[in-house]
Image (spheres, rainbow, N blue to C red):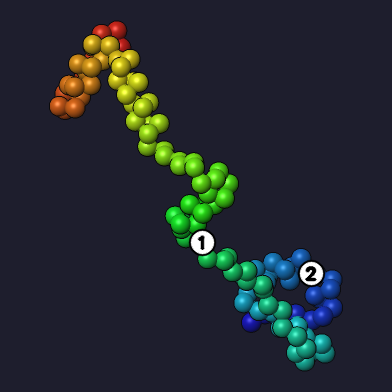
Amino acid sequence: MKTITIRDLRQHWPDAEKALATEPEILITRDGKPVARLLPIVEEEPPRKRFDPEELKRWMIEVWGEGVHFDSLTPLLEDREDRKRLMTHDDRQAAAARELGYAVVMPGLA
């Protein structure tokens, strides 16, 4: 445990503060007798709140109302279907070959 006098503490606070970062406590003395202990404050982080789907559902109803149902899967599937429709014949053949594990090299891209 590190000791420091009151005078040194007042005149050299930055040094005492640095020492407090590494020491568990600093004993403050006056005329060689201990008068106080200086301890670092250890702030505890509050535990992280766990996700509660029921609480999310209540919040969504409060914000959006009863009649609104949020479905994130439907837009994703629609987007995938749009992409499949936009694929050319060569793209479909290359995708099928990739699914079978073949390496596909497209002309002009090699």
Specify few, some or many for label 2: CA neighbours under 10 Å numbering under 14, 14-19, or 20 or more: few
**Picture coordinates of residue 80 (x, y %)?**
33, 26
Residue sticking out furthest to the bottom: 33
Q: Mark 1: which secondary structure? A: loop
Spot occupied by residue 108 in the image (x, y as percentages of width and height)? 29, 7
Question: Which image quarter: residue 35?
Answer: bottom right
Structural distance between the alpha carbons of marks 2 and 1: 38 Å
Q: Residue 110, can we see it?
A: no
> Which numbered tag is attached to residue 7?
none
Q: Position of residue 51 (x, y in %)?
A: 46, 57
Q: Which residue is mark 2?
A: 13
Instruction: Write the residue at 23% across / 17% down.
Output: 92
Residue 57 in sight here? yes
Can you tell which quarter of the image residue 89 is in? top left
- Which label's residue is closer to the chain start, 2 or 1? 2
Q: Is residue 87 left or right of residue 46?
A: left
Q: Left or right of 49: which side holds 28?
A: right
In the depicted structure, whether residue 35 falls above or below residue 16: below
Q: Which residue is mark 1?
A: 49
Could you say which is closer to the camera, residue 44 or residue 33?
44
